[in-house]
Image: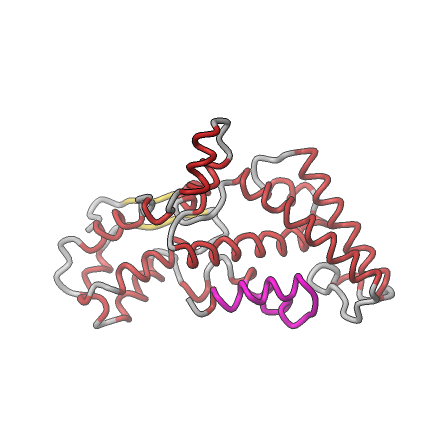
């Protein structure tokens, strides 16, 4: 139990253990997704896609459909080229400097984050370890990256927090006596999921789930209203559309919602 008031301040490194990228890694993945999205917009423009890109262009609903796809394509290219030239340390600053690119930026962030969640669930381990080895300048480590079993890496720092939260608790309500809070700047909900699953498998807390939910709310963590709520909203809306983007995001969404 945390007796001394304790605050955890989390950055991207905290989510790295659970398969999510660091700040710069997220920028690289967004650039890659922007290339895919550019191809989808070009295809939509050339094939006269009869749905309009409302997730990106709500304020342009008065212009023609072809013009809307054209603007979406232009913004996607601008975001990709800007990120390649500026190479920001984190995506947030760049989107803050370019407010007109925020809608498409949020869409791409949602895509990357949910795809990372999907990969982690499928592999049962941290894909970053494999990618780290594969990106090594040493050929031996590159080969090891292709062959390594990500399940063998002991990447799970949240278990230490769970242990300290539960130790010395004799009733479910004791969980609420923990003097702890969390401040996170991450888009993902890996912390929420880890705490919910870990504490939820302790019978003392599982018998009275209200105490567990009250604790999560007390420390500012609520699974149903996590920071990725907007990401899930974007995915749910996009999955109603057609084409590779809608299909890809719909598949990611269905897996994460059922996890």
On the question of residue 7 being in view, the answer is: no
Image label count? 0
- Name the residue: 51% across, 69% down: 254
Q: Based on the displayed image, in which of its 4 quarters is residue 219 positioned?
A: bottom left
Left-right relation of 114 to 190: right
Q: Based on the displayed image, in which of its 4 quarters is residue 16 positioned?
A: top left
Q: Which residues are magenta?
A: 232-255
Q: Is residue 248 magenta?
A: yes
Query: Overall secondary structure of the magenta stretch?
Result: helix
- Name the residue: 37% across, 59% down: 193
- Name the residue: 87% across, 65% down: 64
Residue sitting at the far top: 138
Q: At which x and y percent is residue 121? A: 42, 58
- Name the residue: 33% across, 44% down: 153
Left-right relation of 175 to 227: left
Q: At which x and y percent is residue 71? A: 81, 55
């Amino acid at each position: 139990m945390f007796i001394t008031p304790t605050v955890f301040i989390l950055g991207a490194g905290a989510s790295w253990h659970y398969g999510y990228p660091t700040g710069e890694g997220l920028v690289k993945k967004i650039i890659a997704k922007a290339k895919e999205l550019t191809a989808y917009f070009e295809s939509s423009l050339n094939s006269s896609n009869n749905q309009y890109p409302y997730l990106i262009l709500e304020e342009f609903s008065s212009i023609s459909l072809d013009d809307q796809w054209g603007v979406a394509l232009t913004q996607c290219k601008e975001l990709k080229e800007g990120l390649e030239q500026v190479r920001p340390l984190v995506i947030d600053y760049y989107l803050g400097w370019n407010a007109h690119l925020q809608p498409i930026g949020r869409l791409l962030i949602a895509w990357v984050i949910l795809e990372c969640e999907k990969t982690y669930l499928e592999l049962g381990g941290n894909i970053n370890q494999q990618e780290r080895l594969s990106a090594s300048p040493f050929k031996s480590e590159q080969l090891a990256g292709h062959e390594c079993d990500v399940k063998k890496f002991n990447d799970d720092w949240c278990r230490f927090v769970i242990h300290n939260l539960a130790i010395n608790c004799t009733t479910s309500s004791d969980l609420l006596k923990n003097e702890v809070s969390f401040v996170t700047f991450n888009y993902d909900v890996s912390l929420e999921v880890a705490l919910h699953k870990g504490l939820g498998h302790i019978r003392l807390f599982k018998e009275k789930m209200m105490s567990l939910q009250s604790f999560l709310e007390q420390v500012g963590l609520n699974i149903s209203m996590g920071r990725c709520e907007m990401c899930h909203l974007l995915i749910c809306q996009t999955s109603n559309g057609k084409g590779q983007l809608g299909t890809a995001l719909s598949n990611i969404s269905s897996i994460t919602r059922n996890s």
